[in-house]
Amino acid sequence: MKKIRKIDSVEMFVVRIPLVKPFETSFSIQTHREALLLKIISDDVCGWGECVTSPDPYYCYETNATASHIIQDFLISILTATNNFTIEEVLQQFEKIRGHHMAKAAVENALMDLLARKYEIPLFELIGGQSKKIMSGISIGIQEDIEDLLESIQNACDKKYHRIKIKIKKDKDIEILQMVRSAFPSINLMVDANSDYTIEDLPVLKRMDAFNLMMIEQPLSHDDIYFHALLQKQIHTPVCLDESIKSLNDAKTAVEMGSCRIINIKQGRVGGMTTSNKIQAHCMENNIKAWSGGMLETGIGRAFNIHLQTLPGFVLPGDTSETARYFNEDIVDKPVVLQPDGFIEIPKGPGIGVNVLPESLNRFKVFYKKIL
Ligand code: OSB
Ligand code: MG
């Protein structure tokens, strides 16, 4: 069992990086990625983690402020109270804190990177994955103008993205899908509603069956599992859950109830790589397809998502896009780029394989605190 001896230092940063274009969903318009980062050092080895929270609680209840509170006032004290520990042991202790999976994931991620670097292996090896090319996927925000949407889809096709997801919301759905499908009859297409509908909207959700979509992601409430099961029984298009799955137990419940045929595993949302690994294994055993979601992560979180997809349950392309799709400049040394066939290479080297650039970190930094 790979162990960490003792935590020597913990630092927290918040960086605020402008997006190349605002990103609109049914719940917000984002112009920047404001990311809370953790740097943990043990025996001169350093690991980085990124928290997938935002400043606001519109995607889920956690925010940068709640994560900062939970990390500083609870999680780090658990870490410093033990020596010679495995990550599983730490996670077991984290369980006494209810929820706050994003805060927990940030700490777990930093420990994962640190542990892989300590043993000089790439992160995918630490989690038991197989080296391979990673599929790409792009998530296109809600566009004011249909021409802009069609152009973004064309650009994504030209880059050979393996699947295209478009954000929808009530009254910005059927008409848009008709236009997209007539312009692009055969692309791998899916939609993400970010919880904008209720079961009363069944008629409109049924109409989406006409568009040969790979799936409808999170149509109903962010905390619902029951009504998604009713919905899945009445539509042909696979339902994919995102917001509703915050833990292994949620995934088991959804599978048991038939609430979805696909799960979007965001490692940052479910508490980290370890839980994601368990969820993908559970999906495989139950014929549920999984893919890796994104939260507009910087190069740090993006690298974790890439390594995660070396596990066999990740059978569908995820929201893993090029760095340049979101940022002109990032805080790590290796941007994510698409190969001519649309695949992504795992960054080489120990740990997550990318390194934080101190100068860029400093330039985008809006907050810093030495916690330990
Ligand atoms: O619902 O998947 C989502 C971004 C922020 C919050 C929620 C979601 C998203 C995305 C973009 O769809 C995913 C990405 O490219 O990182
Ligand atoms: Mg989603």
Image (spheres, grey):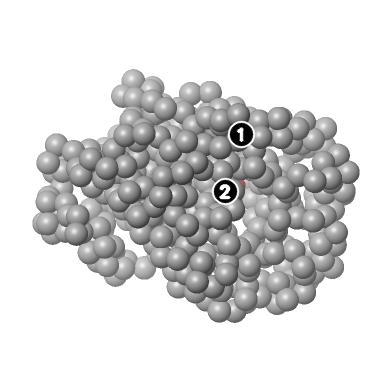
Q: Quadrant of residue 50?
A: top left
Q: Is mark 2 within 8 Å of ligand 1?
A: no
Which label sits on residue 318? 2
- Within 10 Å of disc 1 (Cα), the crowding (few <14, some 14-19, many 20+) is few
Compared with 271, 296 (above or below) is above
Q: How would you rate the neighbour count of disc 2 (Cα within 10 Å): few for under 14, some for 14-19, many for 20 or more?
A: many
Please report the residue visible at 42 percent of the width from the left and 27 percent of the height from the top. 334
Q: Residue at x 67, y 53 (%)?
A: 192
Question: Three-letter amino acid code at disc 2?
Answer: Gly
| Residue 358 placement: quadrant | top left
The disc placed on residue 364 is: none
At numbered mark 1, what does the secondary structure look like: helix, strand or loop? loop
- Is residue 50 in view? yes
Q: Earlier in the sequence, mark 2 or mark 1?
A: 2
Residue 297 horizontal/vertical position (percent): 48, 40
Closer to us: 305 or 9: 305
**Residue 367 seen in the figure:** no
Q: Quadrant of the C terminus?
A: top left
Position of 56 with respect to 13 (left or right) is right
Residue at (23% x, 47% y) in the render = 115
333 relative to 323 in the view: left or right: left
Considering depth in this image, is 41 or 343 the residue closer to the camera?
343
Q: Secondary structure at mark 2?
A: loop
Q: Which label sits on residue 341?
A: 1
Q: Position of residue 223 (x, y in %)?
A: 57, 67
What amino acid type is highlighted by mark number 1?
A: Asp
Quick one: which residue is furthest to the bottom in this view?
257
Foreground label between 2 and 1: 1
Q: Which quadrant holds the N terminus?
A: bottom left
